[in-house]
Every structure is written in structure tokens, then in C-alpha cells.
Image (cartoon, rainbow, N blue to C red):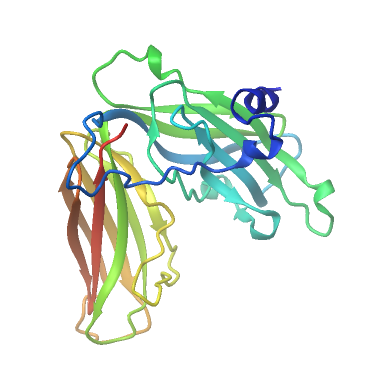
């Protein structure tokens, strides 16, 4: 019923439009020379994690999970995907301690102009059978009533969604008067050694203390690096309070040997003050590897 109502209201009676991703990109107002006068810091949502908190309905660990989790806001009412995997690319959740979904979005900032909607359509793959025998993990939706919040400070919130087969847990934040930050990482110099490393990149804003967004966690495996040096982050877009800092952390370890005198592991942080536009740059160094972090700032409509 919810899907049918959306198709009538926003999909022009095209059923396929329900699944189309947002066509609005991040960094829409990063570069000048002139910025539209209607742009300003806005209230936005930051999603920290989504996890399978508890199982029911006879399901047992491990789970091979696939499907979609998306957010819609009133900027274009289209799906801003947080998680999207098909049946041939499941994520295996092995235990309650390893039940966090590997989020890859949102692809742009989620605005809190009207109530945003979370949509959940997840299944569990049953080995040795066709997709018709797969089990529904969670099929539901819920909204966040941002209009009811009259506070002046950003805050984090946990929401549980229960279904016949599981309970999902969502941790997100209402970030007051914020700007969009789009993060890229690039390996720009290797003076010696193989240049391979494992890493965990995180980000958070000082307006929400103690909550990190995981940009990439290679879990001890080699980080994928393109031919041009770009590091393949799983998530790139976060939001930052207008008078706050963006803190990017990197925990990394060199792989494949190398000079024993080199530091083989690091745990460093870079801090950037929020800006209205343009870019900020900083560098991580691990052994002979130099990684450039670029943050593209953008005000919001």
C-alpha cells in the first residue's frame, strides 16, 4: 500500500520509478565563483549504522543477506540508497557481534525539510535453491518526525524495527544547521615498498560526540586502489555542523613486508573546520605511503 501510494504521488504511475535512485549528486555547490543566495546550512540526517540486532522466526546465524535499504527526503522523493546488494553479492553476517551491514550511502546529504522515510527490503539467501525459496529478513518502512524536534543541539537516536524474522537497529542523528562534506582519498606517493596496506577510515562531526561513520574497513585485507591512486571508500558523504569540525580517522597497517625500520601501522586523525564551499586537504603518512584526503564542502538548498 505504501509503495502504491508513492507511485501515484511521485512516480507518475510508473511502478519502476519506485526503485530509481536519486539523480542529485553531492558537491552541487562546492565550486564558485558565485553561489546561489538561497543556499544555507540546513538540518540534515547522519546515519551511523544499521544492524541485525536479533533473529526470530527460526533464522540462525550465519546469514547471507541481500536487498535494499534506502532513505527518501523531500528534495526529490527518490531513493537515496544506504545498502544495495543483489543475490549474487550477499553480505555474510556471522554472529550478533558481526551483524552490521556494510553501508555504501547515502550518496548525498539527507535533508530534514519534511519527514524522511527509511525503506527496508532485505532477504536471506537459501543455499542450494532458487530465489523463490529465499526468506524475507525485513520488509518495512518508517519515518523520522524531525518537525517535532524543537531543540537547538544535534542529537543521536536509535530506532528498532521488528518483523517476523528479526529486529533491525538503526542509529542516526539529527544534525542542526549543517553542511555537506564529500570525502575522497588518494595515494599520491610511494617512495619504496609494495604500496599495499589495510585500513579503517572513519569520520565524525564534533557536534555528535562519540559516534563515527565508517567510510571504509578493509578488515585486515588490502585496500583497493585504482590506477590513478584513488582509494575506493565505501561511503563518501557526511554532514558537519556549521561551526563544528570534521574529524577523519585512519587506522592502517602496511602489508607485504618492507623496510623493518618503517612504521608499519598508524592511528592518526585529521581535523577540518566546516566551510561553506571549496575544498580542504590533508595527508596521512604510513611508511612510504602518502595518502591525500580531500573534502569538498557544499551548502544545501
The quadrant holding residue 161 is: top right
- The image position of residue 170, as x and y in percent, is 49, 34
Asked if 102 appears above or below 156 in the picture, the reply is below
Whether residue 198 sits left or right of residue 124 in the image: it is left
Residue 92 x/y as whole percent: 62, 55
The quadrant of the picture occupied by the N terminus is top right
**Residue at the location (45% across, 41% down)?**
49
Q: Residue at x 76, y 43 (%)?
A: 135
Q: Residue at x 37, y 30 (%)?
A: 173
Q: Is residue 53 left or right of residue 55?
A: left
Residue 292 position (above or below residue 25): below
- Quick check: 162 above or below 244? above
- The image quarter in which residue 290 lies: bottom left
Mark count: 0
- For image coordinates 48% across by 32% down, the residue present is 76
Of 110 and 261, the residue lying toward us? 110
From the top left corner, tell me how far across and down residue 48 is, in percent: 41, 40
Task: Report if residue 130 is visible in the image.
Answer: yes
Front-lying residue, 186 or 138:
186
Q: Is 261 on the left or on the right of 107, as rendered?
A: left
The quadrant of the image that shows the C terminus is top left
Q: Is residue 212 visible?
A: no
In the rendered image, residue 297, in percent from the top left (x then y), is placed at 24, 46
Amino acid at each position: 500500500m505504501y509503495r502504491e501510494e508513492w507511485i501515484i504521488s511521485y512516480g507518475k504511475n510508473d511502478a519502476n520509478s519506485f526503485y530509481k535512485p536519486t539523480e542529485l549528486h553531492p558537491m552541487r555547490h562546492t565550486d564558485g565563483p558565485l553561489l546561489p543566495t538561497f543556499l544555507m546550512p540546513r538540518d540534515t540526517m547522519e546515519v551511523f549504522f544499521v544492524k541485525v540486532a536479533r533473529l526470530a522466526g527460526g533464522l540462525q546465524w550465519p546469514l547471507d543477506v541481500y536487498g535494499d535499504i534506502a532513505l527518501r527526503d523531500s528534495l526529490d522523493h527518490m531513493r537515496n540508497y544506504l545498502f544495495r546488494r543483489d543475490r549474487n553479492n550477499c553480505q555474510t553476517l556471522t554472529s550478533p557481534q558481526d551483524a552490521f551491514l556494510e553501508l555504501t550511502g547515502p550518496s548525498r546529504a539527507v535533508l530534514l525539510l519534511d519527514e524522511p522515510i527509511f525503506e527496508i527490503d532485505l532477504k536471506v539467501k537459501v543455499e542450494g535453491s532458487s530465489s523463490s525459496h529465499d526468506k524475507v529478513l525485513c520488509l518495512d518502512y518508517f519515518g523520522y518526525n524531525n518537525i517535532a524536534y524543537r531543540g537547538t543541539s544535534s542529537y543521536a537516536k536509535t530506532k528498532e524495527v521488528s518483523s517476523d524474522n528479526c529486529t533491525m537497529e538503526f542509529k542516526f542523528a539529527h544534525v542542526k544547521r549543517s553542511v555537506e562534506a564529500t570525502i575522497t582519498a588518494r595515494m599520491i606517493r610511494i617512495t619504496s615498498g609494495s604500496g599495499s596496506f589495510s585500513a579503517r577510515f572513519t569520520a565524525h562531526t564534533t557536534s555528535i560526540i562519540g559516534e563515527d561513520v565508517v567510510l571504509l574497513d578493509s578488515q585486515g585485507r588490502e585496500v583497493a586502489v585504482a590506477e590513478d591512486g584513488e582509494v575506493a571508500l565505501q561511503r563518501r558523504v557526511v554532514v558537519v555542523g556549521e561551526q563544528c569540525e570534521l574529524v577523519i580517522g585512519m587506522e592502517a597497517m602496511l602489508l607485504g613486508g618492507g623496510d623493518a625500520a618503517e612504521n608499519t601501522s598508524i592511528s592518526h586523525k585529521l581535523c577540518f573546520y566546516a566551510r561553506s564551499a571549496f575544498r580542504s586537504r590533508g595527508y596521512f603518512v604510513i611508511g612510504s605511503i602518502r595518502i591525500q584526503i580531500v573534502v569538498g564542502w557544499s551548502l544545501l538548498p
